[in-house]
Image (cartoon, rainbow, N blue to C red):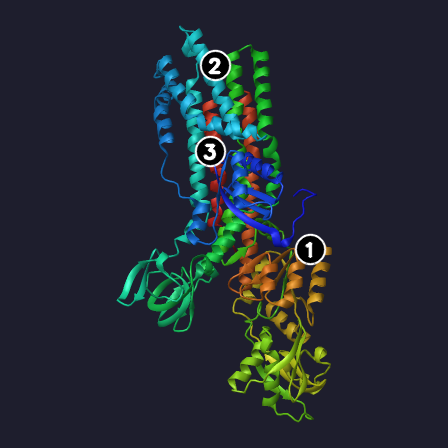
Amino acid sequence: MNENQHTTANTTATARFAIEGMDCQACANRIEKVLRRQQGIIAADVNFASDELQTRFDSKLLSTNDIVQMVAKTGFKAIPASSTNIEALADAQSGEHAGISWRLAIIWLIAIPFIIGMLGMLLGQQWMLPPLWQFILASIIQLGFAWPFYNSAIKSLQGGVANMDVLVSLGTIAIWLYSSVMLFNQHNHAHQYIYFEASVMVIAFVSLGKYLEQRTKKQSLNSMSMLLQLTPKMVRKQTANGWQQVPLSQIQAGDILQTNAGNRIAADGIVSSGQAWCDESYLTGESKPLLKQTGDKVLAGALLSNGSITYQAQTLGSQTLLGDMMQALAQAQGSKAPIARLADKVSMVFVPTVVAIAVLTFILNYWLSSDFNQAITRGVAVLVIACPCALGLATPAAMMVGMGRSARYGVWFKDAASLERSSQVTTVVLDKTGTLTNGKPQIIAQWRAPDSNLNSQKILQLAAAVEQLTTHPLAQAIIQAAQQQQLPALTASHSHSDIGQGTQAQIAGYGNIKVGNPAYCGCSIPQELMEQEVWQIASIVVVAINEKIAGAFAIADALKEDSVSAIQRLQQQHIDIQIMSGDQHSVVEHIAKQLGISHYQAQMNPRAKAEAVHLLMQQGKVVAMVGDGINDAPALAAADVSFAMYGGADVATNTASATLMRHSVTQVADALALAHATVRVVKQNLFFAFFYNILGIPLAAIGWLSPVIAGAAMAMSSISVLLNALRLRKSRLD
C-alpha cells in the first residue's frame, strides 16, 4: 500500500481471482508489482501454486472488473472466484483440465524422429533425419508451436520482469538460428554443426513439464475438488407425488430429503425421522461415526455408513459448514507465508542473472577454445537448465498440501503465515473450561447461607434468571439445573457482565443480584465448607443479594477423554504446557495434576491472561493460546499463534489464527505436528531448488550437460518439488 493511500474500514473490500497463464514465480511477482502500484489497491498477493490472486481494495475507487482489466494489462486473465456458489468456488481454484492438449501431442509427435536419431547416436548408429528434414520439422516447432513461449516472454519483459519463458525462448531460438545458418553455409558437413534436436526436445520437455506441473497443482495439491465431491449431484426429495430423484441445484431450504446407507448428506439440516451412523471426519477430524436420530443436526457431505434418515434442509451450498470450510481453505491456500519472501526476492533477479551467466559462458568458452559450436551449445545449456519455477513452487506447494491435510484433521488455519508460525511454537497456554474439560459442567453441590431467608430452590431460580443471557459453561450449568427442576423463569433487568468474573442484574422484589466468583460478589465461603473435597475440586459460583451472600454452587466439569494423551503428545514435541484459568486455585491444581502439567495459574481475569502471555513472549517463547470463550479473546489476540474452538464465542473465533472443529486439544497436537512437517518440506524444497540451480548451471557451463538433458532436467525440477510436497499427505503426525 502506498504511504499516501488511505481507506476506511467501510470502503475496504476483498476479492479473489483465479489467474490463467502464469508460468513461474516471476509471473506472480509481475502481477503483484503492477497491482500494488495502482491507486485503490491496498494489498495484492498472488500464489503461483494455487494460481490465485487475493486482493484488498477501496471499493469507492475500484471494482472487481477494474482489477480484471489491470491483470489483463500484465498479460494474464483474472477470473473472479465467486463465494456464493460452492461449485463456482471450487471451479475457480481447481479448474478442471482436459487430457493432453493437441499442441503438446503434436510437439511430441514431431519430436519422435529426433528421439530415434538421438537413440541411434547413443548406439553408434546414424539414424538421424537428413539435415533439411530436421530444419523443416524444427522450424514447425520453433516458428509455430513455440509461440506461447514467445508471447509469454514478450509480455513478461513488457511488464518489467523476466520469466522462465524468456530463458526458453532465448535458448531455443539461439540454437535453432545457429543450426539454420550452419545448415545453409556448410552444405557438405552440415550434420557436424546442426543441433535442431536440441531446440525441439527442449520445447517438448518444457511443454510436458508445464502440463504435468499444472495437472499436479490442480488435481493433487488442491483439496477443493475433493471437498466438492463430498456433495451428491442427485438427491431424493419428498414431493406431492412421493420421493423423487432431483438435481442438488433444485433443492431449497425447508425441503425434506432422504439419504440411505452409502450416500452423502446434501445439506446442513435436522433429522426428521429414522436413524443412521454418519461419518463427519472430513470436517471435524473425528474418526468415529456418530449416531444421528430425530432432532439431531446433520452436515452436508457426511457419509451414512449404516441406516437411513429423512431430514429437513436448512442451509445449502456455500452457507453450509462444508461451504464455509471450502471458503476458509481457499482463502488460506491462496495466502503467502513469510518464508516465501526469500524465493520471491530471488525470482525477481533470477532470469537476468542467468542470461548474464549464459553470455559470460559463451564468451569464456569461445575465448578459451575458439570453438563457436561448443561455446553456443554451452551458453544455451545454461539458459535451459536454470529453473525459477522450482523456487516459486517450493513454499506454496507445501503450504497448500499442509493446509489441506490440516483441514481434514479438523483444523482450519486462517492463512499460510499462521501455519508457518505454528511450527515455531515452544509454549502452549490452555484455558481449562471447554478446552481441557468437556465444557458441560454440572452442579454437584449447593450451599445455602444459614442467615438467608430464601430456600435453595429460590436461590437457584434467582441465579438462573441473572445468567439467562450469559454463554459461559458455568452459567449454562445453573440454567440447566433450574430447568430440570422446572422452576418458573424470572425476569431480570439492567443486566451487566464483567467478563471472566460474573454477572449482575435487577430482579423485581429482590433487588440487585450478583452471580459470579467470590471476589466479584464481595463474599467469602465458610472455611469449613472449603475443607470438603467436593468444594475443593469444583468451580465456586456465589449468589449475593444486595451485597449479602445468599448461597453458592459447586460446579464440576470432567476432563475430556483425550486430554491426557493430547498433553503427552505435546510434551513429546518438547513443548511447554501451561494452564491459565479464571477458576479457583484448587480446581486448576486438581486438573493440572491429572494431566501432569506443572505450570498453571488460577483466578485470572482476561487482562491477566493477556499480560501473562505477553510476559512469556518477552522471555523469548513462541506462544500458542488455546481457548473458546469471550474471556479468552484478549489472550488469543496477544499470542503468537491462537487456536479457538469452533462454535465458541465469535470474538474468540475471529481473533484466532486457526479454528478447531472438534473442541479437542488433540487437534492442537495435530496442528503443531503438521506445521512442523509442512515447514520441513518447505525447507527441503527450497534447498533442492537452490541446489539444483547452483549445481546445474556450472555443469552446463563446462559442457557436462547438453541442452537436451538440461531441458529434461528443467522440466523435472518443478515436478520433483511438487511430488515432495505431496509426501505431506502421508506423513506421520505422532
* Most foreground residue, 501 or 117: 501
Residue, disc 3 = 716
Q: Is residue 3 above or below residue 545?
A: above
Give me the C-alpha separation between circle 2 and circle 1: 61 Å
Crowd tier of the residue under label 1, counting other residues whose Cα lies within 10 Å: few below 14, some 14–19, many 20 or above: some
- Left or right, 499 with respect to 290, comes to right
Q: Position of residue 361 (x, y in %)?
A: 58, 19
Residue, disc 1 = 621
Crowd tier of the residue under label 3, counting other residues whose Cα lies within 10 Å: few below 14, some 14–19, many 20 or above: many
Crowd tier of the residue under label 2, counting other residues whose Cα lies within 10 Å: few below 14, some 14–19, many 20 or above: some
Quarter of the image with the N terminus in it: top right
- Circle 3 SS class: helix
Q: Position of residue 307 (x, y in %)?
A: 33, 68
Give me the C-alpha separation between circle 3 and circle 1: 41 Å
Residue furthest to the left: 241
Residue, disc 2 = 178
Q: Is residue 440 above or below residue 421?
A: below
Of mark 3 and mark 2, the one earlier in the sequence is 2
- Circle 2 SS class: helix
Residue furthest to the top: 188
- Choose mark 3 or mark 2, whichever is in front: 2
Give the residue displayed 68% in from the left and 59% down from the top. Answer: 638
* Most foreground residue, 37 or 647: 37
Q: Amino acid at mark 1?
A: Lys
Identify the image quadrant of residue 305. Answer: bottom left
Q: Position of residue 563 (x, y in %)?
A: 55, 66
Of mark 2 and mark 1, the one earlier in the sequence is 2
Visible in this render: residue 584? yes
Give me the C-alpha separation between circle 3 and circle 2: 27 Å
Q: Are marks 2 and 1 in contact (CB under 8 Å)?
A: no
